[in-house]
Amino acid sequence: MKEINLASLLLPIQGQLYSKRILVEEIMETRVAIELEIIRLAIKRATPIMLDKIESYLTSVEQDSADEKNSTKYSRHFAFEQLLAEMAGNRILIMMQSLVHELWGDITSKGWRRRSMEISHQEHMDIFRSIKKRDLPSALTKMENHLLWGVKYFDEMNDPTQS
C-alpha cells in the first residue's frame, strides 16, 4: 500500500487556509461524517467478542493513574474510536479515520488546550452504553456532541487570556 504523505495532501489547500479555526471546522466536519458512519456499522456488526474488547479497554482506562487521566495525548483519546472502527469492519473507513485523526493531531499539536482523558472517557462510556444497547439514535447524538465539543469551544479553549 502506498504511504500517504500528509504534507503533500494538504499542499493544495495551504494557500487557502485563512484561519486555523476554518481548518479545525473542516477537519471536524469530516471526522463527524466518518465517526457517525462507523457508529452505524459498529452497531450493525457488533459481536460479543468486540463488545467485550471495547469494554475491557474502557475498564483499563478507569484504572489509569491520575496523571494518565489528566493526559491530553491523543493516542489515548483516539483508541476508543479506533476500536469502534475495528468493530465496524470497513477498511476504507479505518484508513480515512486514521488520516483524519492524524490531521486533527497535527493541527491541534501546538497552542491547543484539550479536555482531560477523564472527561472524554465519561463520554466514551456513555457512547458505548448506547452501542451495547444498540440504541443508534442515542449513540449518534452522543458521538456527535463528543466530537463537536472541540469546535464549539475553540475560541474559549484557545484564548490566550484564559491560559
Image (cartoon, rainbow, N blue to C red):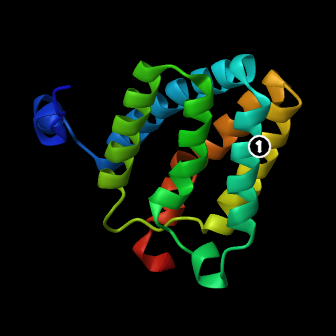
- Residue 57 versus residue 90 in the image, above or below: below
Quadrant showing the N terminus: top left
Residue extending furthest toward the front: 49
Relative side of 157 to 21, left or right: right
Q: Nearer the viewer, residue 15 or 55?
A: 55
Q: Quadrant of residue 59?
A: bottom right
- Compared with 105, 33 (above or below) is above
Identify residue for label 1: 52
Percent position (x, y) of residue 20? 31, 49
Amino acid found under the numbered disc labelled 1? Asp
Percent from the top left, x then y, of residue 146? 65, 45
Q: Residue 128 versus residue 56: which sits nearer the camera?
A: 56
* Label 1 environment density (alpha carbons within 10 Å; few <14, some 14–19, many ≥20): few
- Give how far across and how far down residue 79 sits, in percent: 54, 50
Q: Going 51% across and 26% down the picture, which residue do you hit?
A: 34
Which secondary structure lies at badge 1? helix
Q: Position of residue 62 (x, y in %)?
A: 75, 67
Q: Residue at x 22, y 42 (%)?
A: 18
Q: Is residue 133 left or right of residue 160?
A: right
Work out whether 16 lies above or below 46. below
Residue found at x 81% / y 23%: 137
| The one of 80 and 110 positioned closer to us in this rendering | 80
Is 47 positioned to the left or the right of 5 in the image?
A: right
Q: Nearer the viewer, residue 63 or 67?
A: 63
